[in-house]
Structure formats: structure tokens, C-alpha cells
Amino acid sequence: MSEFPIDRRLLLGGFALAGAATASASPAQTAATAPSGAFTPKPLPFDPKAVTGLSEKLLVSHHDNNYAGAVKRLSAIRGDIGKLDWATAPGYQVNGLKREELIAWNSMILADGAPLLVLDMYEHAYQMDYGAKAGAYVDAVMKAVSWGHANDAFAHAA
């Protein structure tokens, strides 16, 4: 069984599990925000080659496409919202942008929370390594989890 500690930033990839951040994370540890309100994707904080049972290709792809894409998308949406003339903008435009903002925010929010254990079960999370064998993916992730780290995070958050 791997003792590689999967931490909360793996969640940023939207993808795996984590033993997570503490509930008292400092503002410097949360998603970086530029003065304009633009968000900047954080790099993977671990060596994706070191995670047993999940390929480097899968982890990097998930981070670069899913997480970083959501961060960039959120910045673009926030930019569009900032350009709105609220007095004249049609309701459907405001509604559409706010809906898209929520969707993008939900794709990156785990970075700022304190989740203890998360498992992405959308097909994109496992199909590259496991095809349709979702159970094999779950087994691999459960073996890769640092249960001691997750337990410590729970004890700290409780």
C-alpha cells in the first residue's frame, strides 16, 4: 500500500482524494486572486509519477484540463460580468453568466475548503487508465490514500 500523502491540492485537479487542508487555512493558502479578480491556476504540488495506481498522464491531464480550465474559465466569466451594464443588460445574459460562474466556481472551490476525502466519479476521472472499470479506479484510489493524513485532517477540523 502506498504511503504517498495525497493532500488537498490533488483535489484541485478535481480528481482524487485528499486528506485536506485545515479549517484554519490562511488567506495566502487560498486561491490566488489578482487585483482584477482574475484567478491563477496553482501547479500540482506533488510528483504525479509517485501516485501508485493512477498514471502521470491521467493526473496531469485532469489538473491541466479540468482544474486549470475551470480556473481560467472563471476568470473569463468574471471579466464578462465586470463589463456588464447592470441597468441595461438583459436578464438572460446576467442569468447565463451567473450560472456559468457558479459551475466554474464549483469546479475549483475545493481548493479553498477543507474536504477530508473526495473522489471524482465522473468518467473523465478514470477512463484514461481504467476505461469503463470504475470499480478498479476506486480500488486504486483507496490504496493511494494516506489514511493517516485524512484522519489527522479530520481530527484537526473536528
Image (cartoon, helix red, strand yellow):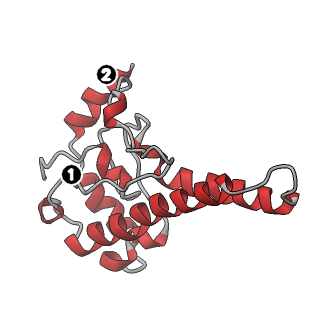
Query: For the point 81% across and 50% down, which residue is it?
Result: 86
Q: Position of residue 106 (x, y in %)?
A: 55, 51
CB within 8 Å, label 1 to label 2? no
In front of the other: 156 or 101: 101
**Which residue is located at x 40 percent, y 34 percent?**
114
Residue 85, given in percent of the width and then of the height, sits at: 78, 54
Q: Nearer the viewer, residue 22 or 125?
A: 22
Q: Which mark is residue 87?
A: none
Residue 100 percent location from the top left of the image: 65, 60
Label 2 amino acid? Ala
Residue 116 in the image: x percent, y percent?
37, 37
Real-space Cα separation, disc 1 to disc 2, in angstroms: 23 Å
Left/right placement of residue 92 relative to residue 45 reads right
Mark carried by residue 155: 2
Residue position marked by numbered label 1 in the rendering:
45
- Residue at horizontal 39 percent and vertical 77 percent from the top: 127
Residue 53 in view in this figure = yes
Q: Which quadrant is home to the C terminus?
A: top left
- Left or right: 55 as drawn, with respect to 30: left
Does any portion of residue 121 appear in the rendered image? Answer: no
- Nearest to the eye among marks 1 and 2: give it: 1
Q: Earlier in the sequence, mark 1 or mark 2?
A: 1
SS category of the residue bearing label 2: helix
Q: Residue 86 vs residue 31: left or right?
A: right
Q: Residue at x 52, y 57 (%)?
A: 75
* Circle 1 Cα neighbour tier, 10 Å, few/some/many (<14 / 14–19 / ≥20): few
Disc 1 marks which amino acid? Pro
Relative to the observer, which residue lies in front, 131 or 79? 79
The image quarter in which residue 99 lies: bottom right
Q: Secondary structure at mark 1?
A: loop
In front: 86, or 12? Answer: 86
Near mark 2 (Cα within 10 A), the count class, few <14, some 14-19 or many ≥20, is: few
